[in-house]
Amino acid sequence: QVRFVESGGGLVQAGGSLRLSCAASGSTVTIIHMGWYRQAPGKQRELVARISTDGSTNYADSVKGRFTISREYTKNTVYLQMNSLKPEDTAVYYCNAIRSSGAFDWGQGTQVTVSS
């Protein structure tokens, strides 16, 4: 089993920046792809950024050019640098592995609120 603890969220004005962290514990060596997800009120959880062990990354169109995902293996941590934030980025952000067998248990997430 793998557990995730997200942090770094907060309240920021539009145009501002935040850096989210995701600390993973457990059998992390088996994880090939990691993702940052978000869920806004009344909406389904969506994948916004993904990083693989070869360093390749993918982003949802809505965040491309503004968000950057990175991974620090020595700390079992994944980051999400968010710049030029918009009110529509307001959501609870989660991290998890991307696996064919499904996600691990979800952490508590971290709230990001962007004011206009």
Image (tube, rainbow, N blue to C red):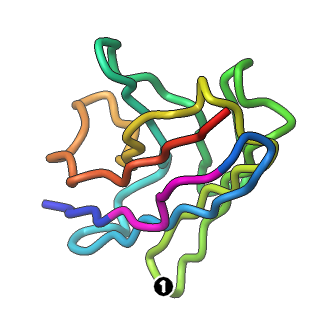
> Which residue is denoted by mark 1 in the rendering?
75
Residue at point 14% right, 47% down?
105
Instruction: Verify whether residue 62 appears in magenta.
Output: no
Q: Which residues are magenta?
A: 6-12
Q: Quadrant of residue 84?
A: top right
Q: Residue furthest right?
A: 65
Horizontal arrangement in the rendering, residue 18 relative to residue 64 (left or right): left
Residue nearest the viewer, comparing 13 with 91? 13
Q: In the image, residue 64 lies at what x, y percent?
A: 79, 30
Label the magenta part by its dominant secondary structure.
strand
Q: Is 84 located above or below residue 81 in the figure?
A: above
Residue lying at 70% horizontally and 32% vertically, measured from the top left: 86
Q: Position of residue 43 (x, y in %)?
A: 34, 13
Q: Amino acid at mark 1?
A: Lys
Q: Foreground: 109 or 55?
A: 109
Quadrant where the image shows the N terminus = bottom left
Local packing at callout 1 (Cα closer than 10 Å; few below 14, some 14-19, many 20+) is few
- The residue drawn where x is 48% and y is 85% is 75
Q: Is residue 81 left or right of residue 105?
A: right
- Viewer-nearest residue: 51 or 20: 20
Residue at the outermost front position: 116
Q: Position of residue 73 (x, y in %)?
A: 54, 77
Q: Position of residue 46 (x, y in %)?
A: 44, 22
Queried whether the magenta region covers residue 8, the answer comes back as yes
In what element is the residue under mark 1? helix
In the visual, does 106 lie left or right of 51?
left
Left or right placement of residue 9 versus residue 26 in this view: right
The residue that appears at 36% across and 54% down in the rendered structure is 110
Quarter of the image for residue 39 reads top left
Q: On the rendered image, what quadrant is the C terminus found in?
A: top right
